[in-house]
Amino acid sequence: MIRPHPNSRPPTVTTQASTAPLGTELTARGIVLGILITLVFTAANVYFGLKAGLTFATSIPAAVISMALLRRAAGNSIGETNIVQTIASSAGTLSSIIFVLPGLVMIGWWTGFPYWMSVTLCALGGVLGVMYSIPLRRALVTNSPLPYPEGVACAEVLKVGHAADSGEANRQGLAAIVAGTVVSAGFSIVVATQLFAANLAQYFRLPGGEKGNGPATGYDLNFSFALLAVGHLVGLWVGIAILVGACIAWLGGVPYLTSGVDGAAEAVALFAWSKKVRFIGAGCIAVAAIWTLIKLARPVVSGLHSAAMSARVRKAGKADSLPRNEQDIPIGTVGLITLACMLPIGFMLSSFATSAGLGDQLGLLVVGGVVYVVLMSFFVAAVCGYMAGLIGSSNSPLSGVGILVVIGVSLLLALVVKPMLPASTGQALVAFALFVTAVVFAVATISNDNLQDLKTGQLVDATPWRQQVALIIGVVAGAIVIPPVLDLLNQAYGFAGAPGVDPKKALAAPQAALISALAKGVIQGDLNWELIRIGAFIGVGCIVVDEVMKRASGGKAHLAPLAVGLGIYLPMNSTLMIVIGAVAGWWFDKRASYKRHPEATKQLGVLLASGLIVGESLLGVILAAIVVFSGNGAPLALVGDSFATAGQVLGLLAFAGIGIGLYRWLLSKS
């Protein structure tokens, strides 16, 4: 997964600790504010992730909001603000569980999200992610040359925001977030009235075919300010890589597979993409993830060894001898919490397997499931933590890690458990594989971001154990809010491919669809491995091109293999606007570089983009609630289908005009 962080293009800063007074860190005021921001951003992340297949990071927006709100509060300090952003960051990260959990609904196993089971799964996986990252902190953060681009950038924002003359900067930053939120929410309201179309799409046949049934393809441009903002955040070269992937899918794979196939161009093209081409993307993503793991194998092992050596200092009686800014949660407590998490995980696996009719092999499933969670969780925690430090959380191949995890557990179930059970239990095994994958994926999502937060804490001289407590608070807060939001969106829109769901209004949930399809294909033995192999070859080719481009350009140009894979398997109504946003962000940064304070101006663009995502996503959740409680699928519609053509013209003109106006407004403020 490429998570578009608001600080994905960090300013050039030093990595020395802050000279600003730390102040009180864990305050009731900071915890409450962090939880409130968490509720808002997590709900937005859940909706946007299901719609577009991407999530956004909340560290910098949370830091800016808290600095602006607490600016005149007595006793406000950089330490307190750091705790606020830490809580919001961990909860926002946990929302990536939506890349797996909706799969249980999509395969028809669940009709909704059982609240306590879903909350417990998210909370336990998230807490394990925090625990697994603690012994890695000294090796991978304190005593490591890893750059941690997002963590360093967030620390710089905190230090600048708490400088004596930062009042105007804080106000401008908050104004950018608010403006983005209001504009994107307002535009979404007009789209909901159907006066503006939601997208501009057309599917057609290319020349060829004896009966006019030549190759089918098309385009789908989504008028989404949130997607435009994602493109701004991920940057030009990632946007180019996504465009390459989209071209492979819609100018290569889909036309090839639809040539000579009868039927409406739209139906034929979408069927070919969803049932075949996206598995090519899965192969590409898997290879990109494996390549990253190979490159990181030696440093990860070295980092783990260093962490084990440093843990000896944590023995009883020695922890207090460490300086304040090196005190983690004691390793003994970490071990007890980890063990305490495994017991309810085993109980959940037992309950799930029993209710699924897998009781004949209950012991094997529970013991094997817990062992898989223990080993695979620590593996993905170490790998994701190191990758986040090296290349940033934004560029970590989390989607590829999820694919590897689900294929691993599915193969074990297919080879070891399935032969001992009746053939009728195949679907139950698929559901069990998704459940186990969800636990491991929750660990991966948190560990992919936690070390970034701890790096921020190091640079502002924070106390590690207090920040780790804040991470746990954020995880629990996120776990509480994610299931009801999922339930609400499921009732209002549904997920593409789920039984009885209208595909025209369903949320795509592309990662969940792909991971559930992989689990089903492996366990039931009908996965088309040929498509996976084609994707793997494409991934290898992208790796070669990427390495050549990096060497030829001195690291300035690249073709991220993971982003190419995402471009293949994400729906086109996500990818095209992301590409446009990447170009718009590049243009804005070029213009900002000529301003008196170029980095501050670029940061305003980042904050505006964050606001655009939050506004549209929150409006989507609110509209879902209106749909559910009113029973009307289009409760705000003012016009009918006859206005569609005019709506497309008006929507396109308004979207372009507002987007240009926002960028010009930011440049004038700087």
Image: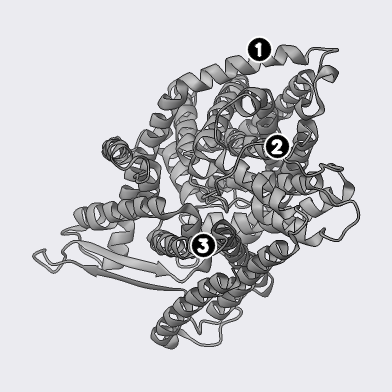
The image shows residue 464 at horizontal and vertical percentages of: 76, 32
Residue at position x 60%, y 20% from top? 371
Callout 3 amino acid: Ala
The image shows residue 215 at horizontal and vertical percentages of: 19, 61
Q: Is residue 36 visible?
A: yes
Q: Is residue 638 above or below residue 540?
A: below
Disc with the residue nearer the chain's start (2 vs 1): 2
For numbered disc 2, what is the local secondary structure?
A: loop
Residue at position x 31%, y 49% from top? 277
**Which residue matches tag 2?**
17
Q: Is residue 406 left or right of residue 246?
A: right
| Picture disc at residue 309 | 1
Callout 1 amino acid: Met
**Which residue matches tag 3?**
229
Quarter holding residue 90 = top right
Disc with the residue nearer the chain's start (1 vs 3): 3
Q: Is residue 177 left or right of residue 536?
A: right
| Mark 2 in CB contact with mark 1 (< 8 angstroms) | no
Q: Is residue 114 visible?
A: no
Q: Is residue 414 above or below residue 276?
A: above
For numbered disc 3, what is the local secondary structure?
A: helix
The image shows residue 252 at horizontal and vertical percentages of: 23, 53
How crowded is the residue under tag 2: few (<14 C-alpha within 10 Å), some, or many (20+)?
some
The residues tagged by marks 2 and 1 sit, at their Cα atoms, a distance apart of: 24 Å
The image shows residue 207 at horizontal and vertical percentages of: 13, 67
Instruction: Depth check: give the residue in front, 300 or 119.
Output: 300
| Mark 2 in CB contact with mark 3 (< 8 angstroms) | no
Instruction: Depth check: give the residue in front, 358 or 364.
Output: 364
